[in-house]
Image (cartoon, rainbow, N blue to C red):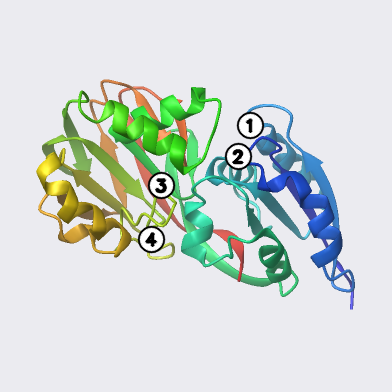
Amino acid sequence: MNRRNILVIVNPISGIGKQRKIEELLEKHIDKEVLSYSVSYTEHAHHGTQMAEEAVREGTYDAIVAVGGDGSVNDVVSGMVGSTLPLGIIPCGSGNGLARNLGIPMNAAQAIEKLNHFKIGEIDTITLNERVVASIAGIGFDARVARRMKLAKVRGFQAYAKIILSDYPTYKEQDYRLRIDGREIERRAWFISFANSNQFGFNTAIAPLARLDDGLIDVCIVDKIPLIHLPLTAPLIYLNHFELSQHVEIFKAHEVEVLNNEEQWVNVDGEGERLGSHLHFVNNRKSLRVILP
């Protein structure tokens, strides 16, 4: 049997440092009778996209594996658009939302062992203007947090929580005009998520009804939750029932436009990006092959 050849793209500064022993773990847990591998490290923002594009052009790899968090995965996926190469994930980021939704173990060694089976499935992606969203995008408070995390010196749940707690009291709801599959609506919202995956990460299921292969975007419109309601609402996020909150409204759609994103920032798979006031989301059904656990 011919061995499959995989390229492992590592973000050396992703998350909380779990990727620092990745070569040691690969050497120990890759089944060398079925897989051979090469390791490359990113050196700057979006370098993972360039590496993935080059790997696709070369045509010598059977899969590309992203080592990092959702932002690192997004970079690699962005370079794989239009190819048939499958994506593997070794989660070493902070939230790891897409990996969690796929059922990939959070333990890097276990995730590597799952690669050996090379079980392939297909999931959707979302096109956002000129960008690709693999897991989830968001505007409003969600984008504010992602923007501030981009400037933070440390990552991880505690860093996210610190920003959320500091900005929550003063951040005001915004007025949004949306066109959802051609129907225009107006809403005042704290944040709006556009979900392919069902969660932000950290096991927080912000879009519990989202499915990775249903051909739909889950548009989750969230009011600012009064402090007095937090003890009742917060547990719903971890119990996969956030849609039951009175502060949440969910639409399912193939195509969505935001016509007035005044702050112009968007959370794209955990990374704050400035993409303008007009946002155009389109679901691309089963457009990405992935290595499943």
Q: Is residue 50 left or right of residue 150?
A: right
**How far from the left and from the top, in percent, is residue 180?**
22, 46
Of helix, strand and loop, which one carries label 3?
strand
Residue, disc 4:
215
The amino acid pointed to by label 3 is: Ile
Residue, disc 3:
136
Q: Does residue 271 lie above or below 241 as drawn?
A: above
Q: Are marks 1 and 2 in contact (CB under 8 Å)?
A: yes
Q: Does residue 86 lie above or below 249 as drawn?
A: below
Dot 3 or dot 4, earlier in sequence: 3
The reply to whether residue 263 is visible in this rendering is yes
Residue, disc 1:
46
Dot 3 or dot 2, earlier in sequence: 2
- The label shown at residue 75 is 2
Dot 1 or dot 2, earlier in sequence: 1
Of helix, strand and loop, which one carries label 4?
loop
**How far from the left and from the top, in percent, is residue 227?**
14, 40
